[in-house]
Image (cartoon, rainbow, N blue to C red):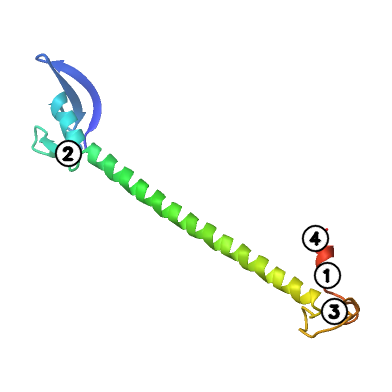
Amino acid sequence: MAKRDETVLLGGTQHVVIECGGCGVMHTVPQTKYDSCYREGGFWHCPNGCSRGWQHGADKQEIDNLRRERDRLKQDTARLHDEIAAEKQRVADAERKAAQVKRRALAGVCPCCNRTFTNMQRHMKSKHPNVVPLEAKAV
């Protein structure tokens, strides 16, 4: 690809002075040709016959880059929405499970051994002393 060095005025026309990347010879290309090849893609030849320029225009490359970026952002957005939905579901499941355990405990069912007791507090202190009551966890 040509490297843009400077512009000069030759015969009333603006030219870009460049060095050929293939053979190293310095030459000029009309500014309009250079700009057209840059935008739309195209080639010119140095005095030694080396083909120089852009296969695709810079505008097309920029559009392709923007499309890729847009698609990547859409994928990221969809992934984040999925993660949010999964997290909401996990929270709802945990709340449902906590409510179930609380209802069962109020009905006298031990959350550890699933047996029914009339005096749940005494059972928990004697058989499961390492389990912390929900009221103590909340504080």
Marks 3/1: CA distance?
9 Å
What secondary structure is marked by label 1?
Answer: loop
Residue wearing tag 4: 138
Q: Residues within 10 Å of mark 3 (few under 14, many from 20)?
A: few
Figure quadrant of residue 3: top left
* Callout 3–callout 4 Cβ contact below 8 Å: no
Of label 4 and label 2, which has the lower sequence position?
2
Q: Quadrant of residue 26?
A: top left
Q: CA distance from mark 4 to mark 2?
A: 67 Å
Disc 3: which residue: 128
Looking at the picture, tell me which residue is in the foreground, 107 or 32: 107
Q: Which mark is residue 41?
A: 2
Q: Which mark is residue 132?
A: 1
Sequence-first tag of 3 and 2: 2
Picture residue at 62% right of the left edge, 68% below the top: 93
Determine whether label 4 and label 1 are within 8 Å by CB.
no
Residue 6's disc number:
none
Q: Nearer the viewer, mark 3 or mark 4?
A: 4
Q: Residue furthest front?
A: 107
Residue 47: % across, % down: 9, 32
Contact (CB < 8 A) between labels 3 and 2? no
Mark 1: which amino acid?
Val
Q: CA distance from mark 4 to mark 1?
A: 10 Å
Determine whether label 2 and label 1 are within 8 Å by CB: no
Q: In what element is the residue under mark 3?
A: loop
